[in-house]
Protein backbone atom coordinates (compact mmCIF):
# COMPACT_ATOMS: atom_id res chain seq x y z
CA UNK A 1 0.00 0.00 0.00
CA UNK A 2 1.54 3.33 -0.98
CA UNK A 3 1.64 6.41 1.25
CA UNK A 4 -1.36 7.97 -0.45
CA UNK A 5 -3.54 4.93 0.24
CA UNK A 6 -2.30 4.92 3.89
CA UNK A 7 -3.32 8.57 4.11
CA UNK A 8 -6.74 7.80 2.67
CA UNK A 9 -7.29 5.02 5.20
CA UNK A 10 -6.17 7.34 8.02
CA UNK A 11 -8.48 10.04 6.71
CA UNK A 12 -11.47 7.69 6.75
CA UNK A 13 -10.53 6.49 10.24
CA UNK A 14 -10.20 10.09 11.37
CA UNK A 15 -13.77 10.83 10.30
CA UNK A 16 -15.01 8.08 12.62
CA UNK A 17 -12.73 8.72 15.55
CA UNK A 18 -13.01 11.76 17.78
CA UNK A 19 -9.57 11.17 19.19
CA UNK A 20 -7.85 10.99 15.82
CA UNK A 21 -9.96 13.84 14.46
CA UNK A 22 -8.83 16.16 17.30
CA UNK A 23 -5.25 14.96 17.00
CA UNK A 24 -4.99 15.68 13.26
CA UNK A 25 -7.31 18.62 12.82
CA UNK A 26 -4.76 21.10 14.15
CA UNK A 27 -2.02 20.07 11.75
CA UNK A 28 -1.73 19.53 8.02
CA UNK A 29 -0.14 16.15 8.49
CA UNK A 30 -2.77 14.43 6.31
CA UNK A 31 -2.47 16.77 3.35
CA UNK A 32 0.14 15.94 0.76
CA UNK A 33 1.96 18.13 -1.69
CA UNK A 34 2.57 16.59 -5.09
CA UNK A 35 4.65 17.92 -7.95
CA UNK A 36 4.71 16.60 -11.50
CA UNK A 37 5.61 17.39 -15.07
CA UNK A 38 2.08 16.69 -16.35
CA UNK A 39 -1.14 16.50 -14.38
CA UNK A 40 -4.04 14.76 -16.12
CA UNK A 41 -7.36 15.44 -14.38
CA UNK A 42 -9.81 12.67 -15.26
CA UNK A 43 -8.94 9.09 -16.23
CA UNK A 44 -11.81 8.50 -18.67
CA UNK A 45 -11.37 7.93 -22.39
CA UNK A 46 -9.38 11.11 -23.10
CA UNK A 47 -7.33 11.33 -19.90
CA UNK A 48 -6.32 7.68 -20.08
CA UNK A 49 -5.38 7.79 -23.79
CA UNK A 50 -3.20 10.90 -23.54
CA UNK A 51 -1.66 9.85 -20.19
CA UNK A 52 -0.63 6.58 -21.88
CA UNK A 53 1.08 8.44 -24.72
CA UNK A 54 2.76 11.01 -22.46
CA UNK A 55 3.96 8.61 -19.79
CA UNK A 56 5.49 6.25 -22.32
CA UNK A 57 7.38 9.19 -23.84
CA UNK A 58 8.36 10.97 -20.59
CA UNK A 59 8.98 7.88 -18.44
CA UNK A 60 7.94 6.71 -14.97
CA UNK A 61 6.62 9.18 -12.41
CA UNK A 62 6.37 12.25 -14.66
CA UNK A 63 2.60 12.05 -15.11
CA UNK A 64 -0.01 12.11 -12.35
CA UNK A 65 -3.60 11.10 -13.13
CA UNK A 66 -6.18 12.48 -10.73
CA UNK A 67 -9.28 10.29 -10.97
CA UNK A 68 -11.73 9.33 -8.19
CA UNK A 69 -13.63 6.43 -9.79
CA UNK A 70 -13.06 2.74 -9.02
CA UNK A 71 -14.38 1.70 -12.41
CA UNK A 72 -13.72 2.83 -15.96
CA UNK A 73 -16.88 2.37 -18.06
CA UNK A 74 -16.96 1.97 -21.82
CA UNK A 75 -20.00 4.24 -22.08
CA UNK A 76 -20.82 3.61 -25.76
CA UNK A 77 -21.87 0.12 -24.65
CA UNK A 78 -24.69 1.55 -22.52
CA UNK A 79 -26.89 1.82 -25.64
CA UNK A 80 -26.52 -1.93 -26.23
CA UNK A 81 -27.12 -2.74 -22.54
CA UNK A 82 -30.40 -0.79 -22.78
CA UNK A 83 -31.39 -3.04 -25.68
CA UNK A 84 -30.46 -6.24 -23.82
CA UNK A 85 -27.59 -6.91 -26.27
CA UNK A 86 -24.76 -6.58 -23.70
CA UNK A 87 -24.60 -6.64 -19.91
CA UNK A 88 -23.35 -4.01 -17.46
CA UNK A 89 -20.51 -6.36 -16.49
CA UNK A 90 -19.29 -6.23 -20.14
CA UNK A 91 -18.95 -2.45 -19.95
CA UNK A 92 -16.34 -1.79 -17.25
CA UNK A 93 -12.83 -2.58 -16.05
CA UNK A 94 -11.26 -1.69 -12.68
CA UNK A 95 -9.71 1.78 -13.07
CA UNK A 96 -6.32 0.53 -11.85
CA UNK A 97 -6.24 -1.96 -14.71
CA UNK A 98 -6.68 0.58 -17.50
CA UNK A 99 -4.60 3.55 -16.33
CA UNK A 100 -1.00 3.50 -17.64
CA UNK A 101 1.41 1.84 -15.21
CA UNK A 102 4.10 4.46 -15.88
CA UNK A 103 1.81 7.19 -14.53
CA UNK A 104 0.93 7.71 -10.85
CA UNK A 105 -2.78 7.40 -10.05
CA UNK A 106 -4.15 9.61 -7.26
CA UNK A 107 -7.59 8.29 -6.40
CA UNK A 108 -9.16 11.62 -5.57
CA UNK A 109 -11.01 14.36 -7.45
CA UNK A 110 -10.12 17.92 -8.42
CA UNK A 111 -11.99 20.34 -6.15
CA UNK A 112 -10.32 23.60 -7.18
CA UNK A 113 -8.27 24.65 -10.19
CA UNK A 114 -5.78 27.52 -9.80
CA UNK A 115 -4.23 27.83 -13.28
CA UNK A 116 -2.50 31.12 -12.36
CA UNK A 117 -0.45 29.13 -9.81
CA UNK A 118 -0.17 25.89 -11.84
CA UNK A 119 -2.00 24.17 -9.01
CA UNK A 120 -4.98 21.90 -8.47
CA UNK A 121 -6.42 21.14 -5.01
CA UNK A 122 -8.14 17.81 -4.42
CA UNK A 123 -11.30 17.01 -2.47
CA UNK A 124 -9.16 15.44 0.27
CA UNK A 125 -7.12 18.64 0.59
CA UNK A 126 -3.99 17.59 -1.31
CA UNK A 127 -2.16 20.13 -3.43
CA UNK A 128 -0.78 19.22 -6.87
CA UNK A 129 1.64 21.49 -8.70
CA UNK A 130 2.20 20.81 -12.37
CA UNK A 131 4.17 22.12 -15.33
CA UNK A 132 1.45 21.12 -17.83
CA UNK A 133 -2.21 20.38 -17.18
CA UNK A 134 -4.65 18.29 -19.23
CA UNK A 135 -8.29 18.74 -18.25
CA UNK A 136 -10.28 15.59 -19.10
CA UNK A 137 -13.15 15.54 -16.60
CA UNK A 138 -15.99 14.74 -19.02
CA UNK A 139 -19.51 16.05 -18.40
CA UNK A 140 -21.76 16.01 -15.35
CA UNK A 141 -25.19 14.33 -15.51
CA UNK A 142 -27.83 16.57 -13.90
CA UNK A 143 -30.72 14.18 -13.23
CA UNK A 144 -31.67 16.34 -10.23
CA UNK A 145 -32.48 19.32 -12.48
CA UNK A 146 -35.78 17.69 -13.50
CA UNK A 147 -38.26 17.60 -10.60
CA UNK A 148 -39.54 14.08 -9.93
CA UNK A 149 -36.96 12.35 -12.10
CA UNK A 150 -34.62 11.03 -9.39
CA UNK A 151 -37.64 9.74 -7.48
CA UNK A 152 -39.00 8.06 -10.63
CA UNK A 153 -35.61 6.45 -11.28
CA UNK A 154 -35.55 5.07 -7.74
CA UNK A 155 -38.76 3.04 -8.09
CA UNK A 156 -37.78 -0.64 -8.33
CA UNK A 157 -38.80 -2.18 -11.66
CA UNK A 158 -40.26 1.19 -12.68
CA UNK A 159 -41.30 2.61 -16.04
CA UNK A 160 -38.63 5.34 -16.11
CA UNK A 161 -35.10 4.55 -17.24
CA UNK A 162 -31.92 6.12 -18.61
CA UNK A 163 -29.03 4.65 -20.57
CA UNK A 164 -26.75 7.53 -19.60
CA UNK A 165 -25.69 6.35 -16.15
CA UNK A 166 -24.37 2.96 -15.02
CA UNK A 167 -26.68 3.45 -12.03
CA UNK A 168 -29.78 3.39 -14.21
CA UNK A 169 -28.86 1.66 -17.48
CA UNK A 170 -30.11 -1.79 -16.39
CA UNK A 171 -33.61 -0.33 -15.91
CA UNK A 172 -34.04 0.22 -19.66
CA UNK A 173 -34.29 -3.37 -20.83
CA UNK A 174 -36.28 -4.34 -17.71
CA UNK A 175 -38.82 -1.59 -18.47
CA UNK A 176 -38.99 -2.63 -22.14
CA UNK A 177 -39.69 -6.22 -21.17
CA UNK A 178 -42.37 -5.14 -18.68
CA UNK A 179 -44.05 -2.76 -21.17
CA UNK A 180 -47.46 -3.95 -22.37
CA UNK A 181 -49.24 -1.05 -24.07
CA UNK A 182 -49.39 2.76 -24.16
CA UNK A 183 -46.96 5.62 -24.74
CA UNK A 184 -43.23 4.89 -24.92
CA UNK A 185 -41.48 8.27 -24.72
CA UNK A 186 -37.82 9.11 -25.39
CA UNK A 187 -36.29 12.52 -24.55
CA UNK A 188 -33.39 14.76 -25.59
CA UNK A 189 -32.63 17.60 -23.09
CA UNK A 190 -32.08 21.33 -23.57
CA UNK A 191 -28.32 21.18 -22.91
CA UNK A 192 -25.14 19.93 -24.55
CA UNK A 193 -25.06 16.12 -24.43
CA UNK A 194 -22.41 13.49 -24.96
CA UNK A 195 -23.12 11.32 -27.99
CA UNK A 196 -26.08 13.29 -29.32
CA UNK A 197 -27.18 10.24 -31.33
CA UNK A 198 -27.64 8.04 -28.26
CA UNK A 199 -31.07 9.43 -27.20
CA UNK A 200 -32.54 8.18 -30.49
CA UNK A 201 -30.52 4.96 -30.83
CA UNK A 202 -32.49 3.48 -27.92
CA UNK A 203 -35.72 4.67 -29.58
CA UNK A 204 -35.00 2.58 -32.69
CA UNK A 205 -33.80 -0.43 -30.70
CA UNK A 206 -36.95 -0.26 -28.54
CA UNK A 207 -39.20 0.03 -31.60
CA UNK A 208 -37.61 -3.11 -33.08
CA UNK A 209 -37.84 -4.90 -29.71
CA UNK A 210 -41.58 -4.15 -29.53
CA UNK A 211 -42.07 -5.51 -33.06
CA UNK A 212 -40.10 -8.66 -32.24
CA UNK A 213 -42.11 -9.21 -29.06
CA UNK A 214 -45.47 -8.58 -30.82
CA UNK A 215 -46.27 -5.52 -28.66
CA UNK A 216 -45.73 -2.88 -31.33
CA UNK A 217 -49.40 -2.52 -32.33
CA UNK A 218 -50.22 -1.54 -28.72
CA UNK A 219 -47.49 1.08 -28.47
CA UNK A 220 -47.27 4.75 -29.43
CA UNK A 221 -43.62 5.77 -29.83
CA UNK A 222 -42.78 9.41 -29.17
CA UNK A 223 -39.40 11.15 -29.52
CA UNK A 224 -39.45 14.55 -27.77
CA UNK A 225 -36.31 16.51 -28.53
CA UNK A 226 -35.27 20.01 -27.50
CA UNK A 227 -33.38 20.37 -30.77
CA UNK A 228 -34.89 22.03 -33.85
CA UNK A 229 -33.63 19.09 -35.99
CA UNK A 230 -33.63 15.30 -35.74
CA UNK A 231 -29.84 15.18 -36.20
CA UNK A 232 -27.31 17.98 -36.73
CA UNK A 233 -25.86 16.66 -40.00
CA UNK A 234 -28.38 16.88 -42.87
CA UNK A 235 -26.95 13.89 -44.76
CA UNK A 236 -27.88 11.60 -41.83
CA UNK A 237 -30.97 13.55 -40.70
CA UNK A 238 -32.56 12.89 -44.12
CA UNK A 239 -32.03 9.14 -43.64
CA UNK A 240 -33.37 9.26 -40.06
CA UNK A 241 -36.54 11.17 -41.06
CA UNK A 242 -37.31 8.34 -43.53
CA UNK A 243 -36.83 5.79 -40.75
CA UNK A 244 -39.16 7.54 -38.27
CA UNK A 245 -41.82 7.94 -40.98
CA UNK A 246 -41.61 4.31 -42.14
CA UNK A 247 -41.70 3.03 -38.58
CA UNK A 248 -44.55 5.28 -37.44
CA UNK A 249 -42.59 7.13 -34.74
CA UNK A 250 -43.89 10.53 -33.60
CA UNK A 251 -41.19 13.21 -33.44
CA UNK A 252 -41.78 16.48 -31.57
CA UNK A 253 -39.02 19.06 -32.09
CA UNK A 254 -38.25 21.84 -29.55
CA UNK A 255 -40.03 19.81 -26.87
CA UNK A 256 -38.20 19.64 -23.54
CA UNK A 257 -38.92 17.42 -20.52
CA UNK A 258 -39.35 19.66 -17.44
CA UNK A 259 -41.00 17.41 -14.84
CA UNK A 260 -41.84 13.78 -14.10
CA UNK A 261 -44.85 12.87 -11.95
CA UNK A 262 -43.97 9.30 -10.97
CA UNK A 263 -47.12 8.73 -8.91
CA UNK A 264 -49.31 9.44 -11.95
CA UNK A 265 -46.98 8.12 -14.70
CA UNK A 266 -47.09 11.50 -16.40
CA UNK A 267 -44.32 13.59 -17.95
CA UNK A 268 -44.51 17.35 -18.42
CA UNK A 269 -42.93 18.96 -21.49
CA UNK A 270 -42.36 22.55 -22.51
CA UNK A 271 -42.52 23.94 -26.04
CA UNK A 272 -39.20 25.82 -26.20
CA UNK A 273 -40.56 28.20 -28.83
CA UNK A 274 -43.64 29.02 -26.72
CA UNK A 275 -42.43 28.57 -23.12
CA UNK A 276 -45.91 29.21 -21.69
CA UNK A 277 -47.14 26.10 -23.53
CA UNK A 278 -46.84 22.99 -21.34
CA UNK A 279 -47.91 19.52 -22.45
CA UNK A 280 -48.55 16.67 -20.01
CA UNK A 281 -48.34 13.16 -21.46
CA UNK A 282 -49.04 9.75 -19.90
CA UNK A 283 -46.24 7.24 -20.18
CA UNK A 284 -45.91 3.49 -19.79
CA UNK A 285 -42.21 3.70 -20.64
CA UNK A 286 -40.00 6.81 -20.38
CA UNK A 287 -36.34 6.89 -21.44
CA UNK A 288 -34.72 10.09 -20.19
CA UNK A 289 -31.51 11.65 -21.45
CA UNK A 290 -30.65 13.97 -18.54
CA UNK A 291 -29.54 17.61 -18.86
CA UNK A 292 -25.75 17.78 -18.78
CA UNK A 293 -23.16 20.45 -17.97
CA UNK A 294 -19.48 20.89 -17.32
CA UNK A 295 -18.57 19.41 -13.89
CA UNK A 296 -19.08 21.97 -11.08
CA UNK A 297 -15.41 21.97 -9.97
CA UNK A 298 -14.39 22.97 -13.49
CA UNK A 299 -17.21 25.43 -14.21
CA UNK A 300 -16.43 27.34 -11.02
CA UNK A 301 -12.90 28.22 -12.23
CA UNK A 302 -13.92 31.20 -14.37
CA UNK A 303 -10.41 31.75 -15.76
CA UNK A 304 -10.36 28.27 -17.28
CA UNK A 305 -13.79 28.15 -18.84
CA UNK A 306 -16.12 29.89 -21.28
CA UNK A 307 -19.60 31.13 -20.28
CA UNK A 308 -20.90 27.62 -20.90
CA UNK A 309 -18.56 26.17 -18.21
CA UNK A 310 -16.54 24.16 -20.75
CA UNK A 311 -12.77 24.67 -21.09
CA UNK A 312 -11.85 27.68 -23.20
CA UNK A 313 -9.51 26.15 -25.78
CA UNK A 314 -8.36 27.02 -29.26
CA UNK A 315 -10.57 24.73 -31.38
CA UNK A 316 -7.68 23.78 -33.67
CA UNK A 317 -4.85 23.08 -31.20
CA UNK A 318 -6.96 22.32 -28.07
CA UNK A 319 -4.54 24.53 -26.12
CA UNK A 320 -6.11 26.87 -23.58
CA UNK A 321 -6.73 30.36 -24.93
CA UNK A 322 -5.01 32.08 -21.96
CA UNK A 323 -2.79 29.47 -20.27
CA UNK A 324 -0.26 27.99 -22.72
CA UNK A 325 0.48 25.06 -20.40
CA UNK A 326 -3.15 23.94 -20.18
CA UNK A 327 -4.99 21.68 -22.66
CA UNK A 328 -8.39 20.00 -22.68
CA UNK A 329 -9.67 16.81 -24.29
CA UNK A 330 -13.04 15.16 -24.70
CA UNK A 331 -16.44 16.10 -23.37
CA UNK A 332 -15.24 18.91 -21.05
CA UNK A 333 -13.61 20.80 -23.92
CA UNK A 334 -15.36 23.89 -25.26
CA UNK A 335 -14.34 23.03 -28.83
CA UNK A 336 -17.55 22.96 -30.89
CA UNK A 337 -17.42 19.29 -31.97
CA UNK A 338 -19.98 16.64 -31.02
CA UNK A 339 -18.92 15.05 -27.74
CA UNK A 340 -17.98 11.47 -28.65
CA UNK A 341 -15.27 8.91 -27.86
CA UNK A 342 -14.47 8.95 -31.57
CA UNK A 343 -13.60 12.66 -31.21
CA UNK A 344 -11.44 11.81 -28.20
CA UNK A 345 -9.50 9.35 -30.36
CA UNK A 346 -8.79 11.99 -33.03
CA UNK A 347 -8.06 14.65 -30.40
CA UNK A 348 -5.67 12.43 -28.44
CA UNK A 349 -2.84 12.60 -30.98
CA UNK A 350 -3.33 16.34 -31.52
CA UNK A 351 -3.25 17.02 -27.78
CA UNK A 352 -0.26 14.73 -27.21
CA UNK A 353 1.80 16.26 -30.03
CA UNK A 354 0.89 19.81 -28.99
CA UNK A 355 1.69 19.17 -25.32
CA UNK A 356 5.06 17.73 -26.37
CA UNK A 357 5.64 20.89 -28.45
CA UNK A 358 5.09 23.05 -25.36
CA UNK A 359 7.41 20.80 -23.32
CA UNK A 360 10.07 21.22 -26.03
CA UNK A 361 9.62 24.98 -26.22
CA UNK A 362 7.80 25.00 -29.57
CA UNK A 363 4.43 26.36 -30.68
CA UNK A 364 1.66 23.75 -31.02
CA UNK A 365 1.10 22.96 -34.69
CA UNK A 366 -1.21 19.92 -34.83
CA UNK A 367 -4.78 20.73 -35.87
CA UNK A 368 -8.01 18.95 -34.84
CA UNK A 369 -10.60 19.00 -37.64
CA UNK A 370 -13.61 18.50 -35.34
CA UNK A 371 -14.01 14.81 -36.26
CA UNK A 372 -16.92 13.06 -34.54
CA UNK A 373 -18.58 9.74 -35.20
CA UNK A 374 -21.92 8.45 -34.03
CA UNK A 375 -22.84 4.85 -34.83
CA UNK A 376 -26.62 5.33 -35.06
CA UNK A 377 -27.90 1.88 -34.18
CA UNK A 378 -31.31 1.63 -35.87
CA UNK A 379 -32.32 -1.94 -34.91
CA UNK A 380 -30.97 -5.25 -33.59
CA UNK A 381 -29.04 -5.70 -36.84
CA UNK A 382 -28.56 -2.31 -38.53
CA UNK A 383 -26.57 0.85 -37.98
CA UNK A 384 -25.91 4.12 -39.83
CA UNK A 385 -22.26 5.06 -39.29
CA UNK A 386 -22.35 8.87 -39.08
CA UNK A 387 -18.97 10.61 -39.34
CA UNK A 388 -18.50 14.34 -39.74
CA UNK A 389 -16.32 17.34 -38.89
CA UNK A 390 -16.64 20.84 -37.38
CA UNK A 391 -18.55 22.09 -40.42
CA UNK A 392 -21.07 19.22 -40.05
CA UNK A 393 -19.90 17.88 -43.40
CA UNK A 394 -19.74 14.08 -43.66
CA UNK A 395 -16.17 12.80 -43.27
CA UNK A 396 -16.70 9.12 -43.99
CA UNK A 397 -14.07 6.40 -43.60
CA UNK A 398 -15.48 3.85 -46.00
CA UNK A 399 -15.98 4.38 -49.75
CA UNK A 400 -19.70 3.52 -49.49
CA UNK A 401 -22.77 5.60 -48.60
CA UNK A 402 -22.68 5.50 -44.80
CA UNK A 403 -26.12 7.10 -44.44
CA UNK A 404 -27.60 3.68 -45.36
CA UNK A 405 -28.53 1.24 -42.60
CA UNK A 406 -26.03 -1.63 -42.70
CA UNK A 407 -25.42 -4.91 -40.86
CA UNK A 408 -21.63 -4.50 -41.23
CA UNK A 409 -21.74 -1.19 -39.34
CA UNK A 410 -23.86 -2.81 -36.61
CA UNK A 411 -21.22 -5.53 -36.21
CA UNK A 412 -18.54 -2.86 -36.07
CA UNK A 413 -20.37 -1.04 -33.26
CA UNK A 414 -21.13 -4.24 -31.33
CA UNK A 415 -17.99 -6.34 -31.81
CA UNK A 416 -15.14 -4.20 -33.15
CA UNK A 417 -15.42 -0.95 -31.16
CA UNK A 418 -15.14 -2.42 -27.64
CA UNK A 419 -11.70 -4.10 -28.18
CA UNK A 420 -10.56 -1.08 -30.17
CA UNK A 421 -11.42 1.08 -27.15
CA UNK A 422 -9.96 -1.15 -24.43
CA UNK A 423 -6.79 -2.30 -26.20
CA UNK A 424 -5.91 0.55 -28.56
CA UNK A 425 -7.53 3.86 -27.54
CA UNK A 426 -6.86 3.58 -23.81
CA UNK A 427 -3.26 2.55 -24.50
CA UNK A 428 -2.71 5.59 -26.68
CA UNK A 429 -2.65 3.58 -29.90
CA UNK A 430 -5.87 4.63 -31.66
CA UNK A 431 -5.99 8.11 -33.15
CA UNK A 432 -9.28 7.64 -34.99
CA UNK A 433 -9.86 6.34 -38.50
CA UNK A 434 -8.25 9.33 -40.32
CA UNK A 435 -5.42 7.19 -41.65
CA UNK A 436 -7.76 4.41 -42.86
CA UNK A 437 -10.00 7.02 -44.48
CA UNK A 438 -7.15 8.48 -46.52
CA UNK A 439 -5.99 5.01 -47.51
CA UNK A 440 -9.42 3.80 -48.61
CA UNK A 441 -10.38 6.90 -50.53
CA UNK A 442 -7.04 6.85 -52.33
CA UNK A 443 -7.36 3.14 -53.13
CA UNK A 444 -10.86 3.33 -54.58
P1 LIG B 1 -15.27 10.39 -19.68
O1 LIG B 1 -14.88 9.17 -20.44
O2 LIG B 1 -16.68 10.51 -19.23
O3 LIG B 1 -14.27 10.52 -18.45
C1 LIG B 1 -14.28 11.59 -17.54
C2 LIG B 1 -13.55 11.13 -16.29
O4 LIG B 1 -13.32 12.26 -15.45
C3 LIG B 1 -14.34 10.13 -15.46
O5 LIG B 1 -13.56 8.98 -15.24
C4 LIG B 1 -14.66 10.88 -14.18
O6 LIG B 1 -14.68 10.03 -13.04
C5 LIG B 1 -13.53 11.88 -14.11
N1 LIG B 1 -13.84 13.09 -13.34
C6 LIG B 1 -15.00 13.78 -13.30
N2 LIG B 1 -14.88 14.84 -12.47
C7 LIG B 1 -13.62 14.81 -11.98
C8 LIG B 1 -12.88 15.63 -11.07
N3 LIG B 1 -13.44 16.71 -10.49
N4 LIG B 1 -11.61 15.29 -10.79
C9 LIG B 1 -11.02 14.22 -11.37
N5 LIG B 1 -11.66 13.40 -12.23
C10 LIG B 1 -12.95 13.69 -12.54
N6 LIG B 1 -19.06 7.95 -28.11
C11 LIG B 1 -18.75 7.40 -29.33
O7 LIG B 1 -17.74 7.75 -29.93
N7 LIG B 1 -19.56 6.45 -29.92
C12 LIG B 1 -20.68 6.02 -29.31
O8 LIG B 1 -21.38 5.17 -29.84
C13 LIG B 1 -21.05 6.60 -28.04
N8 LIG B 1 -22.19 6.23 -27.42
C14 LIG B 1 -22.46 6.71 -26.17
C15 LIG B 1 -23.63 6.27 -25.53
C16 LIG B 1 -23.92 6.70 -24.25
C17 LIG B 1 -25.20 6.25 -23.58
C18 LIG B 1 -23.01 7.56 -23.57
C19 LIG B 1 -23.30 7.99 -22.13
C20 LIG B 1 -21.88 8.02 -24.20
C21 LIG B 1 -21.61 7.62 -25.52
N9 LIG B 1 -20.48 8.08 -26.21
C22 LIG B 1 -20.17 7.56 -27.46
C23 LIG B 1 -19.71 9.22 -25.68
C24 LIG B 1 -18.39 8.83 -25.02
O9 LIG B 1 -18.59 7.86 -24.03
C25 LIG B 1 -17.76 10.08 -24.42
O10 LIG B 1 -17.72 11.09 -25.40
C26 LIG B 1 -16.36 9.80 -23.92
O11 LIG B 1 -16.38 8.87 -22.88
C27 LIG B 1 -15.70 11.10 -23.49
O12 LIG B 1 -14.47 10.87 -22.87
P2 LIG B 1 -13.94 11.87 -21.73
O13 LIG B 1 -12.60 11.37 -21.35
O14 LIG B 1 -14.09 13.26 -22.17
O15 LIG B 1 -14.98 11.69 -20.53
C1 LIG C 1 -14.11 5.54 -33.05
O1 LIG C 1 -12.97 5.83 -33.40
C2 LIG C 1 -14.40 5.37 -31.66
O2 LIG C 1 -13.38 5.53 -30.74
C3 LIG C 1 -12.89 4.46 -30.12
C4 LIG C 1 -15.68 5.09 -31.25
O3 LIG C 1 -15.92 5.00 -29.92
C5 LIG C 1 -16.31 3.84 -29.39
C6 LIG C 1 -16.74 4.95 -32.20
O4 LIG C 1 -17.89 4.69 -31.81
C7 LIG C 1 -16.45 5.11 -33.59
C8 LIG C 1 -17.56 4.91 -34.57
C9 LIG C 1 -15.17 5.42 -34.00
C10 LIG C 1 -14.85 5.66 -35.46
C11 LIG C 1 -14.24 4.45 -36.10
C12 LIG C 1 -14.55 4.00 -37.31
C13 LIG C 1 -13.82 2.81 -37.84
C14 LIG C 1 -15.60 4.56 -38.16
Image: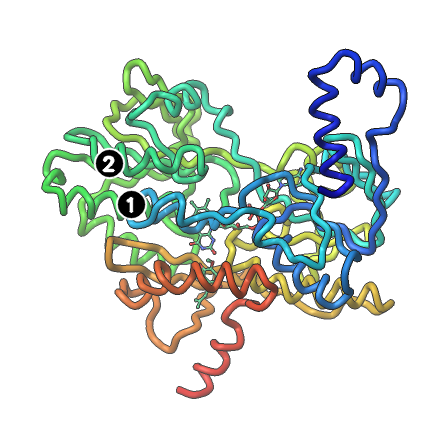
**Numbered disc 1: secondary structure:** loop
Q: Which image quarter is the C terminus in?
A: bottom left
Q: Position of residue 127 (x, y in %)?
A: 83, 38
- Along the horizontal axis of the image, is 213 left or right of 188? left
* Nearer the observer, 73 or 265: 73
Q: Is residue 69 above or below residue 393?
A: above
Residue at (37, 47) in percent of width and height: 79
Determine contact: label 2, label 1, CB under 8 Å: yes
Instruction: Tell me which corner region of the image, top left, top right, bottom left or bottom right, holds residue 263.
Output: top left
Q: CA distance from mark 2 to mark 1?
A: 8 Å
Please give the label number shown on residue 176: 2
In percent of width and height, residue 421 lies at: 49, 60
The mark nearer the N terminus, 2 or 1, is: 1
Q: Is residue 213 left or right of residue 400?
A: left
Q: Nearer the viewer, residue 246 or 17?
A: 17
Asked if ligand 1 lies within 8 A of label 1, the reply is no
| Whether the residue under disc 2 has CB within 8 Å of ligand 1 | no
Question: What is the crowding at mark 1: few (fewer than 14 residues within 10 Å), some, or many (at least 20)?
Answer: many
Is residue 117 found left or right of 14 in the rendered image? right
Residue 4 x/y as whole percent: 75, 39
- The extreme bottom residue here reads 443
- Horizontal arrangement in the rendering, residue 50 relative to residue 267 (left or right): right
Where, by quadrant of the figure, is residue 401 drawn? bottom left
Residue at 42% in and 57% down: 374
Secondary structure under the numbered disc 2 in the rendered image: helix
Colour mapping used in the image: rainbow
Task: Using the image, determine if residue 253 lies above or below residue 205.
Answer: above
* Residue 50, above or below 339: below
Q: Residues within 10 Å of mark 2 (few under 14, many from 20)?
A: many
The residue indicated by pointer 1 is 83
Q: Residue at x 74, y 27 (%)?
A: 10
Query: Is residue 106 shown above or below 355?
Result: above
Amino acid sequence: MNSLRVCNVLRKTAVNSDLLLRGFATSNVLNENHKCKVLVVGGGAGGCAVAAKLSSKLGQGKVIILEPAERHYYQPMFTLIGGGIKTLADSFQPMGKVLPTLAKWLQDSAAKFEPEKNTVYTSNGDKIEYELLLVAVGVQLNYDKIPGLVEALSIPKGKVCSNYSPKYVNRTFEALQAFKAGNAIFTFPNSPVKCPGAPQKILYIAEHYLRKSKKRQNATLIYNTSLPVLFGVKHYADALWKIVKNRNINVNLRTNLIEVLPGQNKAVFQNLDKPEEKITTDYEFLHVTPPMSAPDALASCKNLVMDTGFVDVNKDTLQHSKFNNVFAIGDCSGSPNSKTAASVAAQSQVVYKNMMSVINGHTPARIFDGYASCPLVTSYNTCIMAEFDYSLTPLETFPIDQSKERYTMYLMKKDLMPPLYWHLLLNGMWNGPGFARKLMHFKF
